[in-house]
Image: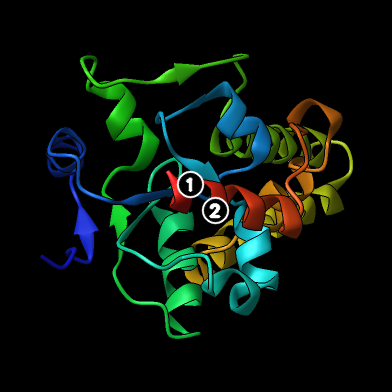
Amino acid sequence: MALPFKTSVTDLAQMREEGRDLLLLDVRTPAEYESSHIPGSVNVPLNLIDEHPEELSADIDRDTVIICRSGARAQRAQQKLESVGITGLSVLEGGMEAWRSSKELPLNQGKARWDMERQVRLVAGSIVGAGVLTSTVFPKAKWLSGAIGGGLVYAAVSNSCMMGEALAKLPYNKGKDVSLKEAQRQLREHRAQ
């Protein structure tokens, strides 16, 4: 049975219970993955998929449910992987947030960190607030707030986030690095199970 374009948390839990051979592909950053993930999932960060879809395609050889925080990065990964001919891909509807909110489902917990989206909201809001306050003394500072607003609009339209990508490089957000070779090794190990 082919996977739908999106898979609900309930459907995924049922497929796992039935022992269906699925690859759970978590495309969040290594730090996000380390803080919590679905048992049995494999972490292949979105930046690796963006840079090396062809190299990863040989190791994504069965029905795959793609997971991120809420679904946006997973959809981007799905499009990128489909562009190189991979089929049988589905996005976990609601992502880890939906999985986590269903308290009875298994979850591997690690070091608690703020989700990337929450960090982006904090930084963007702080810069906008500082720009507005500063503009009471230096009127041209309002353009700082305008630039952040424009960046957020661009992020929504392009389904990407440059601020999130920049924040992911901070030491706080660094988890164990996942190289292309490491991702391929994990995918092969998972296939052999």
Locate residue 114: give its quadrant.
Answer: top right
Q: Where does label 1 land, which residue?
A: 190
Q: Is residue 89 visible?
A: yes
Q: Does 6 sit left or right of 53 as displayed?
A: left
Q: Where does label 2 land, which residue?
A: 187
Residue visible at 51% across and 44% down?
42
Q: Does 79 sit left or right of 58 as displayed?
A: left
| Label 1 residue SS | helix
Q: How many marks?
A: 2
Specify how the rendered protein is coloured: rainbow
Extreme residue in the front direction: 192
Q: Quadrant of the C terminus?
A: top left
Residue visible at 30% across and 51% down?
22
Q: Quadrant of the N terminus?
A: bottom left
Locate residue 9: give its quadrant.
Answer: top left
Label number found at residue 10: none
Residue type at mark 1 is His
- Of 82 and 76, nearer the camera is 82
Residue type at mark 2 is Leu
Question: Are the residues flagged by discs 2 and 1 in contact, CB closer than 8 Å?
Answer: yes
Locate residue 125: give its quadrant.
Answer: top right
| Label 2 residue SS | helix
Q: Is residue 151 visible?
A: no
Q: Is residue 107 above or below residue 10?
A: above
Residue 16 on image: x %, y %: 21, 38
Residue visible at 50% across and 85% down?
84
Label 2 neighbourhood size at 10 Å, few (<14), some (14-19), many (20+)?
Answer: many
